[in-house]
Image (tube, grey):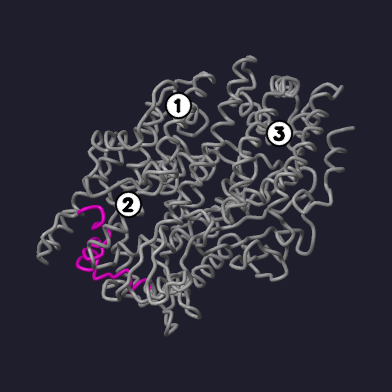
């Protein structure tokens, strides 16, 4: 039986987790038929089917070539892929006790299955044969790229190691999968277990009405009517410490928020981190790298930790200078008001707003009255249409996993090109933060497959019947994550491994960070920044204030981010297989070494630093946001040089060279095709209002 025949027989198993997605609008996942109890047997069945396909590829009697090896491998495991994707959706958005139990059991099993495929000697031998003859095999450029990417990935994951090393590598990966699950569940437990409850309305001084109403509704939902409840999530706690006048309550909320995963007891993530670091260091050594950081960076645009650190330290110096200026401005206001305090981390956001008001006569609460969640969604759609001719049409006949989720069919020139799901609100069992997910990746090498993507956030629902008002930062985050969605939706390549957002980590943030730049444009604000009560557009004078203050607080935001990125790189460079590192002690040591202002802490402290410790995804890679921002600043200049962010010719070139090509083109080459040269790193410094200087 050929691999393609096996794939065809695996299309329909009479199981909603495994079956091909069919139905109106081009097919979709049947969330209405998903049962948590079915995850384990369905995924196990998916593994069995994929094993048969892998065995057919590895044991094929025909001489290995691109079609019967690399293409067949990319076509394998479809039922397994569908089941695991739905499972991952549930672990991120519907992670109750039953899902957590399934995740705990399945995480090491899934890791072992990945290693089983990578360590299949017969399969790797065929891949190697085709790879080594690729230059003379008349392969198309995309086929050559797929061979390069897949073969390199197999080698990086240990396919060429000896038997004993492979066995140990498999043990390490299984244990890491379990530890990542424990880390995530510990973080989620602290987010759900700790809340800040206010008993007296006077203690809400400084908070805008929409936050008060949301907190009252949250308390009522917990059976605490007459009180106000603030959850331990960024969308709830960050506004609280920004506006609450009661300093002691700001400190209480700040400590609760920053101590997630760092509390004594069953959910303490410090020992979990220590073991993760040791295992990553041992794995890197097995694979021939000095550290986990070297292993990660070897497959990124930066190539080496030294290059990533050089860029970070170049920006760090300027950011610290700016942050100290910001602190001085805040301290001056506190002194004039007779507060009798020294600015502390729980004061930063609160006094920053006072400085913003004094310097720019700009009040964030005033801005938020014009930023309605639904209107910002409409704004994102409008920009996508203006730039890429994409139209989003809401549909109501598609099943979802929770009533909060809405679904949109995406069209271009009346042709359906994909799906977009939106899950905007916080709830129990949902990971904190905001992210994009690909339910299904675009491809066209066997049949044309449309992408299905989602955006997920944790906004706090407002008072019943009232629009949800969001901050400027929240609106920027919406545009950021929607940029990832556009990357997935605009993909136009043949092979799923190369499609959509499957690019290098320090390149994947370019489309998302660039998309943020359309939010502050007059075209968006005049149409969609409408007052939630009067419906009137945001006044031109308020827009002018926003533009004048665009670099306000850049010291804080840059230091807050870079402190975490530098820590991430340094601790992975320092970790060894036989040393137990204390994440908290290393944090203090690192902040002292780099001269981090005492008024600022890492945006994500180690015990809830999911980018680092909930998976391998962004580990030793949190720097990528800065690396990508250098690309973003330069890419934005391409539009500015043309006279408008809405210049259709630049948008077309950006779509053709970057947004649609996935990983079918090396990222540095893709950027050169767009800009006509290598990136200008000084563009980032100029954009943030920092002085341009040499490393």
Q: Position of residue 41 (x, y in %)?
A: 75, 44
Range drawn in magenta: 344-368
Q: Say which element carries label 3.
A: helix
Q: Is residue 372 visible to the viewer in this orientation of the structure?
A: no
Residue 143 - label: 3
Residue at x 43% of width, y 71% of height: 219
First-in-chain label (1 vs 3): 3
Question: Which residue is label 2 attached to?
Answer: 557
Q: Say which element carries label 2.
A: helix
Residue 564 - label: none
Q: What is the spatial separation of the Cα atoms under label 1 and label 3, in whole angstroms? A: 37 Å
Of tags 1 and 2, which is closer to the observer?
Answer: 1
Q: Give the side of residue 45 with respect to residue 372, left or right.
A: right
- Please identify the quarter of the rendering in which residue 71 is found: top right
Q: Main secondary structure of the magenta part?
A: helix
Look at the picture and state if 566 lies above or below 11.
above
First-in-chain label (2 vs 3): 3
407 in the magenta segment:
no
Q: What is the spatial separation of the Cα atoms under label 1 and label 2, in whole angstroms? A: 31 Å
Q: Position of residue 283 (x, y in %)?
A: 52, 24
Question: Which residue is label 1 attached to?
Answer: 278
Mark 1 crowdedness (10 Å alpha carbons): few <14, some 14-19, many ≥20 = many
Q: Position of residue 3 (x, y in %)?
A: 83, 34
Q: Position of residue 626 (x, y in %)?
A: 40, 43
- Please identify the quarter of the rendering in which residue 525 is found: bottom left
Look at the picture and state if 302 lies above or below 631.
above
- Please identify the quarter of the rendering in which residue 541 is found: bottom left
Q: Quadrant of the N terminus?
A: top right
- Nearest the eye: 29 or 639: 29
Q: Give the side of residue 252 with respect to residue 380, left or right.
A: left
């Amino acid at each position: 039986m050929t691999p393609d025949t096996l794939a065809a027989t695996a299309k329909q198993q009479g199981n909603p987790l495994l079956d091909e997605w069919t139905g109106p609008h081009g097919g979709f996942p049947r969330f209405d038929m998903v049962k948590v109890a079915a995850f384990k047997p369905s995924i196990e069945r998916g593994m069995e089917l994929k094993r048969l396909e892998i065995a057919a590829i590895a044991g094929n009697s025909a001489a290995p070539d691109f079609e019967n090896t690399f293409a067949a491998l990319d076509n394998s495991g479809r039922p397994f892929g569908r089941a695991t994707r739905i499972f991952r959706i549930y672990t991120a958005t519907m992670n109750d006790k039953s899902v957590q139990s399934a995740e705990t059991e399945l995480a090491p099993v899934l890791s072992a299955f990945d290693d089983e495929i990578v360590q299949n000697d017969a399969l790797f031998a065929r891949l190697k044969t085709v790879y080594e003859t690729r230059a003379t095999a008349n392969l198309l450029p995309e086929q050559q790229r797929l061979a390069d990417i897949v073969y390199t990935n197999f080698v990086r994951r240990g396919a060429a190691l000896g038997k004993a090393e492979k066995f140990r590598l498999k043990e390490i990966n299984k244990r890491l999968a379990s530890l990542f699950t424990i880390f995530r569940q510990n973080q989620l437990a602290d987010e759900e277990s700790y809340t800040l409850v206010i008993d007296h309305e006077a203690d809400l001084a400084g908070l805008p009405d929409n936050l008060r109403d949301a907190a009252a509704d949250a308390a009522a939902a917990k059976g605490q009517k007459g009180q106000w409840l603030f959850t331990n999530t960024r969308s709830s706690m960050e506004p609280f410490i920004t506006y609450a006048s009661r300093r002691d309550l700001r400190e209480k909320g700040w400590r609760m928020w920053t101590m997630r995963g760092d509390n004594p007891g069953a959910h303490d993530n410090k020992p979990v981190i220590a073991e993760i670091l040791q295992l990553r260091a041992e794995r890197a050594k097995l694979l021939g790298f000095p550290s986990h950081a070297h292993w990660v960076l070897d497959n990124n645009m930066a190539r080496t930790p030294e290059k990533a650190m050089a860029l970070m330290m170049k920006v760090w110096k300027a950011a610290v200078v700016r942050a100290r200026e910001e602190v001085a401005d805040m301290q001056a206001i506190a002194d004039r008001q007779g507060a009798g305090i020294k600015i502390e981390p729980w004061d930063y956001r609160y006094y920053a707003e006072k400085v913003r008001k004094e310097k720019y006569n700009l009040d964030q609460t005033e801005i938020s009255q014009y930023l309605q969640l639904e209107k910002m969604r409409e704004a994102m759609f409008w920009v996508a249409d203006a730039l890429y001719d994409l139209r989003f049409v809401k549909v109501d006949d598609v099943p979802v996993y929770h009533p909060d989720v809405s679904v949109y069919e995406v069209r271009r020139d009346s042709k359906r090109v994909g799906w977009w799901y939106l899950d905007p609100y916080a709830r129990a069992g949902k990971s904190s933060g905001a992210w994009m997910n690909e339910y299904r990746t675009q491809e066209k090498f066997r049949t044309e497959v449309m992408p299905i993507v989602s955006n997920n956030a944790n906004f706090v629902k407002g008072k019943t019947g009232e629009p949800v008002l969001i901050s400027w930062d929240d609106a920027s985050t919406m545009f950021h994550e929607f940029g990832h969605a556009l990357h997935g939706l605009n993909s136009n390549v043949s092979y799923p491994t190369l499609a959509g957002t499957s690019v290098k980590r320090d390149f994947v943030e370019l489309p998302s960070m660039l998309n943020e730049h359309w939010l502050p444009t007059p075209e968006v604000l005049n149409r969609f920044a409408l007052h939630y009560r009067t419906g009137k557009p945001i006044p031109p004078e308020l827009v002018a204030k926003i533009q004048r203050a665009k670099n306000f607080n850049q010291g804080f935001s840059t230091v807050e981010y870079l402190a975490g990125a530098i820590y991430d790189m340094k601790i992975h460079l320092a970790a060894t297989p036989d040393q137990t590192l204390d994440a908290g002690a290393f944090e203090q040591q690192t902040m002292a070494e780099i001269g981090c202002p005492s008024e600022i802490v890492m945006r994500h402290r180690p015990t809830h630093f999911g980018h680092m410790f909930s998976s391998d995804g962004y580990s030793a890679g949190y720097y990528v946001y800065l690396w990508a921002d250098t690309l973003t600043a330069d890419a934005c200049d391409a539009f500015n040089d043309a006279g408008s962010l809405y210049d259709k010719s630049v948008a077309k070139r950006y779509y053709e060279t970057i947004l649609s090509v996935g990983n079918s083109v090396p990222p540095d080459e893709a950027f050169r095709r767009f800009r006509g040269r290598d990136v200008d790193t000084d563009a980032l410094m100029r954009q943030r209002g920092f002085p341009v200087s040499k490393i």
